[in-house]
Image (spheres, rainbow, N blue to C red):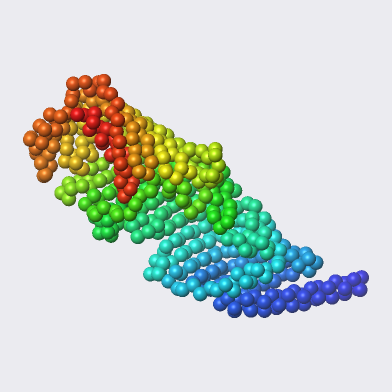
Amino acid sequence: MAIIAGSLVLLGVILIILNQVAESKLKNAVDAALAEAGGSYEDINVNLLGGSVEANEVKLKLEEKTVEASAIQLDGIGIIEYLRTGNIEIGEIIINDPRFVVDNGKKDTVTEKSSEKDKKFKENISIENVKLTNAEIRILQKDSTDKLYSKFSNFELQKVKIDSNTIKAAIPFKFEQYKLQNDSLFFQLNDLHTLTAENINAENGHFEVVALKMLPRYNKEEHQQQIPYEKDRYNFSFSSIELKDLSWSIENDTLHLLNPYMEVNEPNMEIYRDKLQPDDPRGKDLYSKTIRELPVKIKFDSIALKDGYIVYEENTRPSRPAGAVDFSNFDATIYNFTNIGMDKPDFPKTEIDVQTLLFENAPLKVHWEFDVSNLADRFQISGNLGSLASTQIDEFLKPAMNVTTSGSIEDMQFNFSGNDDIGSGDLRLSYKDFKVEVLKDDGTEKNSFLSAIANLVIDNTTSEDREFKDVEVERNKKKSFWNFLWLFIRDGAIKTLI
């Protein structure tokens, strides 16, 4: 018994010595690596028997990038496997309070040496679970303000693998499952707008964003002082956006996103345009070209927008409030939103179906389709509008065009097709007792002479049986698709009225 007891004591002493040797060697290795990278730690603990390592108050600085963590813990380290094969197996890595900061105000001087090291990477590393708690990511601009700020209460990756092949990829590791809980997001899109979200939750393909907002940085008056020419002011919010089965990959350095169904709930969109500003001289692409030339490859089978509200305001006169057009109870479904496989003969058309109320009263239905793969950007759009009273039309016409109306629009149907250069189609407008009053410049009195001329040319005799009128419109490539459609409807309405 004494021999056995003595052997156990001796074994324990040997393990303690080995643990201290391992801890000393590990500390020396970590010290050397961190010193080369400008890093440090407060203390490190090694448990050889338990196969664990824990480092506290770790800091790493690489030029403009800084990484800090209150604690990094590695558990379930396969010591025997490493001694036998040279492969590294770890049960779990837990990183507490990591803080990642990229300061774009500091010049990045990283050289190609890092890629040379990647080519020499020979280890095979397997990690069952990687977990980050209370993580923060910040990207700073040159003035040290946030370009991006995001906070994660939890972020997990399962079945992580790193080897000589993965290390060369844009994401230098592979994983089988993931889970994240994001508590806040701030991103400055540009000088005029920011993007925020209250929560982002994702787990193995299911992705949900709560309270996503695109917010203007300035009020309407200040916005105009920041722009050299017409630039829309956006104020968007979405109660939630949900992707049911999102998958992604990186192929030839290009991100691919695939998802069968996406749901956007309560999109609330306010768009303000000041027409007093100089025209934007830049060309505007049609949507098919925009999707075709996206920097990412995307395939979403269907996207549903539910219970939305859209208002467009346009300011055309300095002494008047902006004219407004609104669409409530807005529901839309987009089919085949994709730019993948455009060379295939069976590449599908993108189709969009819309149902909404114009001015909260007149039902409007629209069907729109285009072929993303078509280099001429051909499209077709049709729709019909129900009864609309003159008082509702005047909400836009009076402040925007200095015109008021009486009577009503009973029905409007249109069918318009075109490409990047020209469009044609037909429109029918039925109306009742429709009259126009042209106002004086101050907007307070009727201009009797101009009103009389306008009403003289309006034909109210056969308004119930109006025929479709052929319309042809040339596209102004400095204007958007919506300007193209508006010109068609405007010219068709004028042909019908006279």
- How many dots with numbers? 0
Which of 214/14 is in front? 214
> Where is residue 343 drawn, in percent x and y?
54, 44
Up-down relation of residue 142 to residue 385 (above or below): below
> Where is residue 242 drawn, in percent x and y?
50, 44
Which of 97/449 is in front? 449
The residue sitting at 69% across, 75% down in the picture is 26
The residue sitting at 27% across, 49% down in the picture is 273
Can I make out residue 329 in this image? no
**Residue 166 location, quadrant:** bottom right
The residue sitting at 21% across, 47% down in the picture is 316
Lateral position of residue 407 relative to residue 93, left or right: left
Of the 4 image quadrants, the one containing the N terminus is: bottom right
Of the 4 image quadrants, the one containing the C terminus is: top left
**Residue 451 location, quadrant:** top left
Lateral position of residue 281 relative to residue 366, left or right: left
The residue sitting at 61% across, 59% down in the picture is 131
Can I make out residue 319 in this image? yes
> Where is residue 241 drawn, in percent x and y?
47, 45
Up-down relation of residue 107 to residue 248 (above or below): below
> Where is residue 268 drawn, in percent x and y?
37, 43
